[in-house]
Image (cartoon, helix red, strand yellow):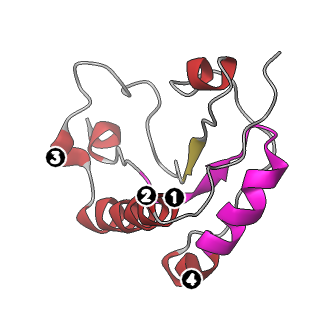
């Protein structure tokens, strides 16, 4: 049981950009002021297997959060033992700040977030 008590959500580190280099330039600028919160990287590659995939498939930009899964027990994620009391307040607060910052930046942009071509 001790291993289960170590389950974490992890801090938000940045985003998998799904090959969208034009959006990465903006995301990198938005990430810069969050470096002191350990949000430090946007990766051009994607992972292609999460909830963003259908958005990208129809030409809408979708991205996946890079999480710090240090000590995260992947055997319990999305199961009946994935309890909220295993979250750490500081990690949840950090992730909320990063996500709120990105949502605000996206909302106040003059242009749409750049799209990539659909396959």
On the image, the x and y values in percent for residue 22 come to 81, 53
**Stretch of the chain drawn in magenta:** 10-31
Give the CA separation, mark 3 to mark 4.
30 Å
Label 4 packing within 10 angstroms: few (<14), some (14-19), many (20+): few
Residue 119's place in the image compared with 50, above or below, is above
Label 2 packing within 10 angstroms: few (<14), some (14-19), many (20+): few
Closer to the chain start, of discs 3 and 4, is 4
State the mark number for residue 33.
4
Give the CA separation, mark 4 to mark 1.
15 Å
Report which residue position mark 1 lands on.
Answer: 106
Mark 2 and 1 residues: CB-CB less than 8 Å, in contact?
yes
Label 3 packing within 10 angstroms: few (<14), some (14-19), many (20+): few
Give the CA separation, mark 3 to mark 1.
31 Å
Side of 79 where 34 appears, left or right: right
Asked which secondary structure carries label 3, the reply is: helix
Quadrant containing the N terminus in the rendered view: top left
Report which residue position mark 3 lands on.
Answer: 85
Give the CA separation, mark 2 to mark 4.
14 Å
């Amino acid at each position: 049981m001790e291993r289960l008590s170590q389950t974490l959500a992890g801090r938000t580190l940045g985003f998998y950009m799904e090959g969208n280099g034009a959006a990465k330039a903006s995301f990198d600028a938005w990430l810069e002021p969050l470096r002191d919160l350990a949000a430090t990287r946007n990766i051009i590659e994607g992972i292609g297997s999460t909830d963003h995939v259908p958005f990208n498939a129809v030409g809408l930009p979708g991205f996946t959060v890079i999480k710090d899964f240090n000590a995260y027990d992947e055997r319990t994620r999305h199961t009946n033992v994935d309890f909220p009391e295993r979250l750490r307040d500081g990690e949840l607060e950090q992730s909320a700040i990063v996500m709120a910052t990105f949502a605000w930046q996206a909302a106040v942009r003059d242009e749409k977030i750049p799209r990539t071509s659909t396959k």
